[in-house]
Amino acid sequence: MVITTSFKTFTKNYHKNNDTILPDEKSTIYIVRISHKEAVKDYNIMKRSERMLWDKDSKNRIKKEDWLGFIVNREGKIIIELYYVEKELSIAERPKHWKSSKHTDQRIKNHIFHREVIEFKNQPILYYTWDEWKKHINYSPKYMPRGTSRSKNPFKTLDYVFV
């Protein structure tokens, strides 16, 4: 096989042919740190589930075709795992195992009951080290989001890496 385009274009076309969606420089990306023990438990359940469900941000801004990056600790390294939002679902779709309480020790204004549900596309997960992600979008080395927040988009300079 001969690559006649940039490697990034080749990679994107290859995965598109395999029904894998990749982010680009126009993609909307949200990020959230998963560190509270209940959040870690729910995240691990989601990763093993046939339907990968999560709740939206506190203002229900996450939409279909957005991306959500989970900042997690894997084997002593902080990484970000990126998922594509395939569907938006109602509050009624909240899994029964989700706790009715918050997943943070920080003070919050609203309970999580109002958060709608999103479903991720079943496809390979993109992942990056958290330091690499911050470097490509000029975040401070000490930066860590509080709650779910919109991220700057690194895909003008960042290559694709899969789990």
Image (spheres, grey):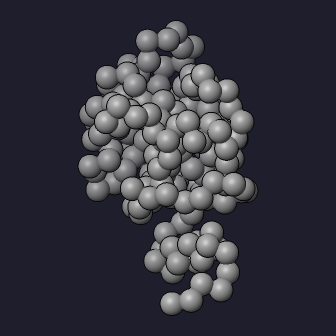
- Residue 65 relative to residue 72: left or right: right
Q: How many marks?
A: 0
Question: Residue at the location (61% across, 73% down)?
Answer: 7
The residue drawn where x is 63% and y is 54% is 158
Quadrant in the rendering for residue 10: bottom right
Looking at the image, which residue sits at the far front?
Answer: 2
Outermost residue toward the bottom in this view: 1
Asked whether, in this view, residue 150 is left or right of residue 90, the answer is right
Residue sitting at x 35%, y 31%: 76
| Relative image position of residue 117 (x, y in whole percent) | 47, 43
Relative to 49, is 103 above or below? above
The image quarter containing residue 59 is top right
Instruction: Residue 24: give x, y in percent of width and height.
Output: 66, 60
From the viewer's side, name the closer residue of 30 and 73: 73
In front here: 15 or 29? 15
- Whether residue 137 can be seen here: yes
Residue 36 position in % (x across, y down): 37, 21
Q: Residue at x 28, y 31 (%)?
A: 41
Q: Work out whether residue 42 can be spotted.
A: no
Image x and y of residue 30, in percent: 60, 40
Q: Is residue 92 above or below residue 58?
A: below
**Quarter of the image with the C terminus in it:** bottom left
* Residue 144 falls in image quadrant: top right
Q: Is residue 5 above or below residue 78?
A: below
Q: Nearer the viewer, residue 81 or 38?
A: 81
